[in-house]
Amino acid sequence: MTPLPQVDAGGIELVEAALREADPGAGLVALLDERSPHLAGRTTADAERLRGLALAAFAHLSETPPAAMPFVLEELESGRNPSNVAAAARALRGGGPHLPAEAPTLLVSAIERLRASDDKLRFPTGHDAPPTALADLAATLEILGMAASAAAPALEQLLATHGVELSRDVRARMVAALEAISVAPGHCCGSPVEPNDHAEAVDPEAVGDATLVRALALEDQDGSTQTFAARFAGRPTAVAFFYTRCTNPERCSLTVTRLAGLDRRLRAANIDANVAGISYDPQYDRPARLRTYGNDRGMAFSSRCSLLRTVDRFDPFVEAFKLGVGFGPVTVNQHSLDLVVLDADLVVVRRRRRRLWSADDVIDELAGIVGRSSNAALRPPRVARNGDHRQRV
Amino acid sequence: MPAIDVDEYRKAYEQRLKKAAVTTAEAAEPADDDLAAEVTNLIEVASNRKAPLVERVSALRKLGGLEFLGPRFSPFNAVYVAALRTLATDPRATLRRAALESLALRKDPEGRELLIRGLEKPADALVPEAIALQYLGHDDHGEIVPLARKVYRRSKGAAREEALRILATDPESEPTFKRLLNDKKEVSSIRRLSASALQDLNPAAFEKAARRIVVDDSEFNEIRSTSLTALSQQADSPADSKLVEQVEALHQRARSPAVKSSSARFLDAHGADPTS
C-alpha cells in the first residue's frame, strides 16, 4: 500500500515558487493570507498543511519580514497544529531586528498549550532536525539565545510544573534552551540579538468600512431578523466573527466565551453597548445552533448581546471588514481572530486581528465612545485628519 | 467473650481499607519510569508483524488504556500516534481498524486521509466503507460531506446509512431527507434517521411531513411513533386543534404500544388529556 507523502506536493510547489520570486518574503506572506486564491476551495487539512510549509519557509530567508510577524505570533498564541506552531517558531529564527518582544514568551506558552499533543514535523527539515514539534520549539528557544531571555522565568516554571508531561528529549532540549537564554551578557559568542518592541504591522486600509453591510439582514439566535444598522446603530458595538464548527478551541469557542464575559462586565459597569458574534458559516449556524453554542459558553442573550448569522450572503462582511477568512468546499478552512469596535454611527474605530484581544482595552474603548457621545453636544464638529482611520457610514 | 472496642475496630478496618486502596492504585498505575518502558514494550509488540495477532491486539488495547492516564501519558503521545499511523496500514484488518478508530477519535489528519482515500478509491480501502464513514463522522467539521454524498448515491446497506448520518447536518441534503421520510418503501431506520435530520435542518418542513404521517393509517407504526415523539418536542409551536383531535382519535384506536405511548406524550405536551 502506498504510504502517505510526508509533505503536500502541491503545497511544496507553491512555496518553492514563492521562494523564487523577486521578493520571496512577500510571496510567502501572500500564501499565509486566509483570502489567498491558493487557499480557496482547499480542505482545512490542505490549507493547514500549506500554512505550515509557508511558515517554515521563512527560515530559508536571511530575515523574516515584519509583515509575516502577525501570522507568526498568531500561530504561536492560538495555533493547535503542533507542526505549524513549530514552523511559525522557526520563522522567528530569522527575526533579526524585527523579533517581537513577546515572541519568546509566546513560544513557551505554545509548548505548554501543546504538551499533550506533540507530533512529528510535517515540513521539510534537515537531517539533524529534532524529531517532534515540541522539541523543535525548544530548539528555536535555544537558537534565539539571549534574545529570548524574557522567557526564562516562564520556561523554568513550565519545566517545574509540567516537566513530567514532556518526553525526555523535549525536557532535555528545554533545559538546554534555559541555559542558552540565561547566559549572562558578555559570555555569549558574537553580538546577542536584542528583542525589539516592534508592534505588529497594521495596514490602515484594513480597518474596515461598514457601509457595505449597513442594510444587510442579520438573524439572531431567536430567529429575529434586523438589518445591521437597525441592530447596532445608536450605541457602540464590539463585534467578533466565529463559527460553531471551528475545531480550534483557542479561537471561536474562546471568542464567544470571552464575548459573554465582556457583556457581563459591560452590564455590571452600566455601559450601554452591543456585544455580538457573527457567524462565518450562516447556512450551518442557524438560530437553534447559535443559541445552544452561546448558552454553552455563558452568553446572556438580550437586545444588547447576540449571536447572528447573515440571511443572505456572507461575502459583503468579508469585504467590509477585510476579514481574514478562507473557505473550502464545505465551510471555513482558515480564519484569524477578528474583532471590530464600532461607534454609535457605525464608524469603525478599532480593529483587532489575529491576536487575543484584551477585554479591558475593549471595555475602555466602548466606555470612551459612550463618554464622547454623551458629551458630543458640547463639542465642535470633528474635522478628518490625514491618517485618521475613521470611515463614516 | 471480651467486649469489642468499636472505635479501635473501626480504625483498624479503615487502615486496612486504605492500605488495600494504595496497593490497588499502585498495581493499576505504573510508576513513570516503568511507564516509559511499558509503553515502549507495548508499541514494539503491537508493531511487530511477526508476533501473534492476539498479542498485538492485546498490546494495542493496553496502550489505549494507558492513554487514560492523561498528563502522565503525554510524553509518549508522539511515538504512540506514529505507531498508530503505521498500524493503520498493517496487513491485519483487526489492527488497521483499531488503529484507524483511535486516530479518528483524535481527529488525526493522516488517519483521516487514509480513510478518505479508501472511500475515493475503494481498491485502497483499509476498512469497510460504513466503518470509514463512521470514523470520519467523529470530526463534524463537515468537509466529508461531498464524499458522503457520493457514497450515499453508489452504496447500499450500512454504508448508505452512515453516509446519511454525515449528511444529516448538511443544509443541501434537506430535499433528500424529505423524500426519504415520505418514501414508504424505504427501510425504517433510514426513515427515522431522515425524520431526525429534517427536524434539525428545517423544523417547519419536518412538521408538515410529520403531520401527514401521523394521520396516515397506512403508515408504519414505528414512523408514526417517531413523528409523534418529534412533534411533542416541538411543543413551542402550538398544534392546531384539528391535529390534536386527530391524534386523540389515533390514541383511542391505536393498538401499537409505541403509537399509544407517543400519542399520549404528544397530547400531554400540547395540553390535551389522553382519555385512555
Image (tube, coloured by chain):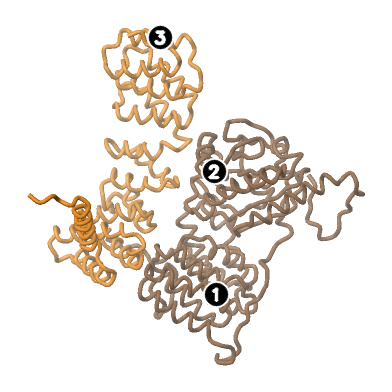
Q: Considering depth in this image, is A300 or A287 the residue closer to the camera? A: A300
Residue displayed at 73% across by 38% down: A229
Dot 2: element: loop
Same subunit, labels 2 and 3: the answer reads: no
Q: Considering depth in this image, is A173 or B13 the residue closer to the camera? A: B13
Give the quadrant of the N terminus of chain A: bottom left
Q: CA distance from mark 1 to mark 2?
A: 33 Å
Q: Amino acid at mark 2?
A: Gly
Residue furthest front as drawn: B2
Give the quadrant of the C terminus of chain A: top right
Identify the chain drawn in orange.
B
Residue displayed at 51% across by 63% down: A51
Spot occupied by residue B36 in the image (x, y as percentages of width and height): 27, 70
Can you tell which mark lies on residue A298?
A: 2
Dot 1: element: helix
Identify the chain drawn in brown.
A
Tell me the crowding category of disc 3: few under 14, some 14 to 19, or many 20 or more residues within 10 angstroms, Cα based: some
What chain does badge 1 belong to? A
Same subunit, labels 1 and 3: the answer reads: no
B162 is higher (above) or lower (below) than A182: above
Can you tell which mark lies on residue B246?
A: 3
Q: Amino acid at mark 1?
A: Ala
> Which residue position holds label 1?
A151
What chain does badge 3 belong to? B
